[in-house]
Image (tube, grey):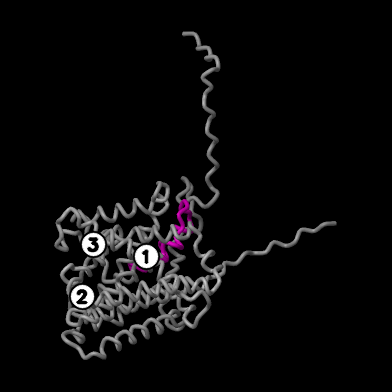
């Protein structure tokens, strides 16, 4: 008698490439925030800052878009948006409000204006919600680019609910989704090492050229207000550009950041490294590092001209912050804040006596097949008598 073999449960295996990219990208975020007080007086610090900002946020958003689901939302995905994004936002926005009040500021609990780094949580929630609708259209990436460029021409889109950055950086999120649709990860991982290093040599040359160009033309970048363009949180008029061609600057930045993002991913180790496990802690690093850097931002410790060693020291310090905040003891302590499960807040079933609130997968019956077109040669059906 033939027996059926027992079913095996497929387990998802993490790809080291993406965890490596996550941790290095978030570390660059910490470095960018750490050296920010130095850029006004130090051209070298400003060059490093512009180099990092030319691609690091784009990489972070692209990776988020790569793993975003574009199918119809179900109960699980909606719950994840609440527990992974919405609840942490309210928790940390409240913490920042109380902290400012304790330090002598006014108490103003305003959840429509994100504190410092918390804009990303609002943006991520809006990107995830809008992606299934956007990908229903043809050419979603081109549409996202057009929306981003067009938004810069109006001053009505501001930092309220992080809309300016959400719309401005939308192309990076859609670009990440497109990379997954093109199934580039499998092809890249299957390349022989010698072929992969040819691509990496091109990526190294690209980043080297940008590193050389930044300090050479540093005064030009200051005059162009390039940093403000890279933040995507202001209209062109607010930056000082009211010309019709102002959107071309954002277009160049968007396309170059996408190119740099691909070059960045090409340079990521494909194997497991000493920091691969840290790639699972990026949200902890993102939400907690701002508290460590807050004194440097507010006290003026780094204000004015600094000795040459301060810049490399701050970079090493920021790398240390990223490592420490990735450790398991830190994650264990802060898990209730960063990853609140809030099981008590959810219904045991996503339905009520009056109807379904959230449809689980497979709850909707299949749509009826489309009716066949009428045959023009068929005789007309008799009409009923009047």
On residue 159, which mark appears?
3
Q: Earlier in the sequence, mark 1 or mark 3?
A: 3
Q: Position of residue 165 (x, y in %)?
A: 28, 62
Local crowd at mark 1 within 10 Å, few (<14), some, or many (≥20)? some
Local crowd at mark 2 within 10 Å, few (<14), some, or many (≥20)? some
SS class, disc 3? loop
Magenta-colored stretch includes residue 277:
no
Magenta-colored stretch includes residue 85:
yes
Contact check, label 1 and label 2, Cβ < 8 Å: no
Residue at label 2? Answer: 218
Local crowd at mark 3 within 10 Å, few (<14), some, or many (≥20)? some
**Residue 277 located left or right of residue 98:** right
Q: Is residue 240 above or below residue 197?
A: above
On residue 259, which mark appears?
1
Secondary structure character of the magenta stretch overall: helix
Query: What's drawn in magenta, residue-wise?
Result: 63-90
Q: Residue at x 34, y 86 (%)?
A: 316
């Amino acid at each position: 008698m033939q027996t059926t073999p027992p079913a095996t449960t497929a387990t998802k295996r993490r790809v080291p490439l993406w965890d490596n990219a996550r941790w290095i990208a978030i570390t660059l975020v910490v470095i960018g925030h750490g050296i920010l007080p130095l850029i006004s007086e130090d051209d070298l610090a400003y060059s490093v800052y512009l180099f990092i900002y030319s691609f690091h946020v784009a990489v972070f958003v692209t990776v988020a878009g790569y793993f975003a689901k574009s199918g119809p939302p179900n109960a699980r995905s909606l719950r994840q948006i609440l527990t992974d994004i919405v609840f942490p936002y309210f928790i940390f926005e409240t913490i920042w409000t109380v902290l400012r009040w304790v330090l002598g500021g006014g108490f103003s609990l305003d959840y429509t204006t994100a504190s410092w780094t918390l804009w990303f949580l609002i943006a991520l929630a809006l990107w995830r919600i809008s992606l299934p609708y956007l990908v229903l259209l043809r050419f979603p990436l081109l549409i996202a680019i057009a929306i981003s460029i067009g938004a810069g021409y109006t001053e009505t889109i501001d930092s309220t609910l992080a809309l300016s950055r959400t719309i401005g950086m939308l192309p990076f999120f859609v670009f990440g989704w497109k990379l997954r649709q093109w199934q580039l990860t499998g092809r890249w991982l299957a390349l022989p090492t010698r072929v992969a290093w040819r691509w990496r040599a091109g990526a190294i040359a690209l980043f080297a050229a940008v590193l050389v160009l930044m300090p050479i033309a540093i005064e030009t970048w200051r005059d162009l207000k390039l940093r403000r363009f890279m933040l995507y949180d202001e209209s062109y008029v607010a930056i000082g550009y009211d010309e019709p061609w102002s959107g071309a600057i954002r277009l160049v930045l968007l396309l170059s950041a996408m190119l740099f993002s691909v070059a960045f991913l090409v340079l990521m180790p494909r194997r497991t490294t000493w920091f691969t496990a840290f790639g699972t802690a990026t949200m902890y690093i993102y939400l907690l590092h701002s508290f460590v850097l807050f004194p440097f931002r507010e006290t003026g410790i780094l204000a004015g001209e600094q000795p040459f060693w301060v810049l490399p020291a701050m970079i090493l310090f920021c790398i240390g912050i990223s490592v420490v905040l990735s450790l398991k003891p830190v994650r264990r302590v802060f898990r209730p804040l960063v990853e609140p499960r809030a099981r008590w807040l959810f219904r045991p079933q996503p339905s009520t006596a009056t109807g379904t609130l959230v449809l689980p997968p497979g709850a909707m019956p299949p749509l009826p097949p489309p009716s066949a077109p009428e045959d023009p040669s068929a005789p007309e059906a008799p009409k009923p008598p009047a």
